[in-house]
Amino acid sequence: MNQEENKSKRNNCPTKLLSDLPSEEDYFGGHERVAGAIAKLINGEDGGKSIAVIGSYGSGKSTVINLFRKKIESENNETKVFIFDAWQHEGDRLRRSFLEQLIDSLREFEWLEKRIADEEKNSFLQQVTKEKLTRWGALMLFIAIYSPLARSFLSNKESILEWSRENSPLFPIEYKPLIHALYLIAHAFPPLVAISFRHLGIFIFSLPLVYIFLGYVFCKTQDKPFDFSFLSNKHALRGPEPSSIEFQDTFDRLMDRVLIKDRKLILVVDNLDRVIEDSQIIELWGTMGTFFNSRNTSQRKWRKQLWVIAPFNDKSINPRIRRIPTENSKPNQPNDKIKSITDELIDKTFQATFHVPPPVLSDWRTYLIRCLKQAFEEHTPEDFNTIYFLYQRAYQEGEAEVHPRDIKIFVNKLCAVHKQWEDGIPIAIQAYYVLLRSQLLSNEGKFFETAYQDSAPRLIIGNNRYEELIAALYFNIEPERAIQAAMRKPVEKALLAGNFEELSKYKSFHGFSLVCLDIIQRASNSGEWITSPWKIGLVAWAIDKFGPTDGDAQFRQSWRFLEDLAGKVTWWVGLSKDVGRGISIILRRPIGQVQLELAKKILPALCTNQPNLEARAELKGLSLAECWAEGVIPTIHVLHESKNSDLIRELFSVPGNPNFYFEVMKYVSGIKNQELIRYFVPPDVNQINPTLKDRIQNRQALTGLPIIINTIVRVDNSNAWPQWQGVDSAIGSLFEKSAISADDRDSLIYVLVLLGLKNAQFFMQRLHSLSRNNAFNEWIKPEWGHNPKRIGLLALAVFFSQPNINTKMSQSLYSRIAEKPTEHPDIINEMVSFIREMDIQPELEKMGKSTLADYLRTELNQQSPQPSV
């Protein structure tokens, strides 16, 4: 077969819808068994009993009834089955509909004569008379309306003859008597004649006269009178709903007539559970009781010749018959009690119950493939097996029972899809689409999330264009366009979440860069991201990490939109590390003056107002100061590296109150590039020291004070900040007036050493005062031999404040360290760590020569710096 033949076959794949009518064959085995058992029961016992056939939706109850009907009617010609479909007559008057259909069926069985059937029907029908205009009346009405017009037209007969002679040479002048005759008729019956002058002369339309003539002839041949009356009586039949007593009387009368000799009648009330209105279900349920419970039932012989069968889904019918009163029913009963009452009602109504089980795996597999073969004749067994595996997996995951009707519905849905695409998309992918769409009909996001993240269908189907083809089916457009529509929401979600693993799935798809551009362009046009600016940073970071290459035109356009959006932000709400990375990437791409102008817009927006994380639920519970600092550091780093330090100093500062500033400084103390700390200037330096003083006096987080102060002193011009004396006095008051913990004391001594060496001599004076009061003696003594870190800090304080005093106990202990540092390596290591941490190496160089100073310098040169946090 050549390529053209293949194409023709692909575009003309025959597809046949399956009928939803109940089957007359048993494909599952169990249906035939149930039908045979019911037939044996009816053939072997007297009637007057009701049988329930219970099964879930689509399990094959109607198939059981069809098989039963075929079997029992073939075995005995005197046994007939009457099936009343309650669902088909929903909304009708059910008792009347039942009786009408029953009478018609009895006529078909030839158990009831036509005359008697008509009499029975008329017994519960009413005749309604309506008047209607006859055809003769309509003709006369037409004449009355158009008579003046016709008279006027034919009033000048001489003009008509003259005109016809000039314009219609075929019309002979000898017809003048005819014109005179028409003139007379038109005055009597003007509308009966219409004249047209064109080529053939006068053409006379006399259809009304023809109608009257033909009607008269017809009536004569049929021996019927010709009716010249203007109005006729229109009769219509309208049947009111019989009462329960009238229904019983009519039903009993019919049974008396037809159930004679050995005849048996089986009444089947089908689809009872499909009726929507609860009131009609209750009415039908009550009606079934009248079949055997009429006033004179015990005296009627036909009772033993009548059976009632009701197939229904008990799970559906139970909640809907609770309103039927029983001996044990009470209002406001619990659900378990109600269930027992409805079970009691079912048991009371039916003397025998048969259950239709769901098909087992092997049975429904055979049935599914049979249905697929019937619907798709030209497809291969391999296609059918693949569809079976997909279908089996879908229903196993949903833990649902598989029924014949479910299979038919699935196959017909697949037929509808296949009619549109035929073999343009593999039928297995179409089948998976139908299954998935049935489960997730109204949730587009969930549909594609399931379709693309579930690897099992991909393995079963084995098609490398799986994603594109699923999208094409969903949007009903070409795969290349459909995949872009399908990608938009998940790609946007992945971009905003920085989900690189998810983006990696879509990067190879056709149109990925175009989808990214579309997402960004829409945001630019709507302005949505300007009020939610963290999205700009997140998208920039994600595209930089996992976007197209710089050679992609859509990619370059995306960056231009991002740069434009970043420049329009007036307040960067929701800053975080990932957002900061994205902002820095946007700022890094342009160079020269373009970068400078963009930086002038971005920097002020970073520190406009007090930072806020409320807009980003995913950051709930995180440190506000940490998120903000992580968000601005990458941008500061880019501008610092591009030699724009003056611009940073001019436009950047830490926003918010002093307490927020302290938290920020605590975080930035651990950044890798310590040079960046210098830019973290508070908005108002005059508020810093008073707040710091209050924190010290209130002993608020003193253990974190060293880190904060150590960071602040690295900020530009911090040594010139006013009111450091207030901090000094607050520290002194704690030492002098109240007992403090060893940890808080260490923090305060750290601050005194640090600030005392940073050109604030009054802090060093505080250390001198503590030394003179023998404070160090009390602090070093209990720590000796087991806490080298604390001793190292105290020794450092003594070293810088009073290096030559060694007459007291504290100085005697210190002298051991100072004279023989090699014997105290742990303490020396801690002293070196503090010197490096405080960045006071220049101050060490100023201490002059001594055993301890020289040893500390040597250790500083030999030890490598600790890695920054």
Image (spheres, grey):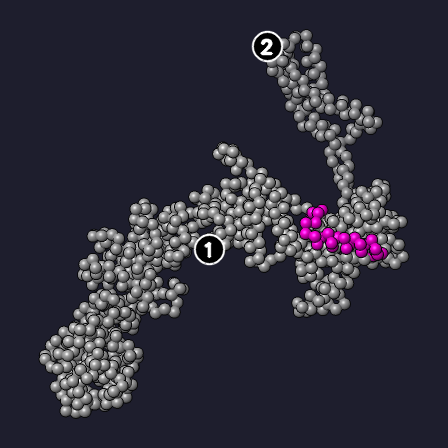
* Left or right: residue 438 compared with residue 219: left
Secondary structure under the numbered disc 1 in the rendered image:
helix
Examine the image and state in which quarter residue 595 appears: bottom left
Residue, far left: 849
Residue 166 numbered mark, or none: 2
Q: Residue at point 76% right, 22% down?
A: 213
Read off the residue under disc 1: 453
Residue 668 numbered mark, or none: none
Q: Residues within 10 Å of mark 2 (few under 14, many from 20)?
A: few
Which residues, given as a range, are shown in magenta? Answer: 22-48
- Residue 47 belongs to magenta span: yes
Above/below status of 101 relative to 827: above
Q: Is residue 705 visible?
A: yes
Task: Name the one closer to the observer, 198 or 23.
Answer: 23
Q: Residue at point 20% right, 83% down?
A: 824
Disc on the earlier residue, 1 or 2:
2
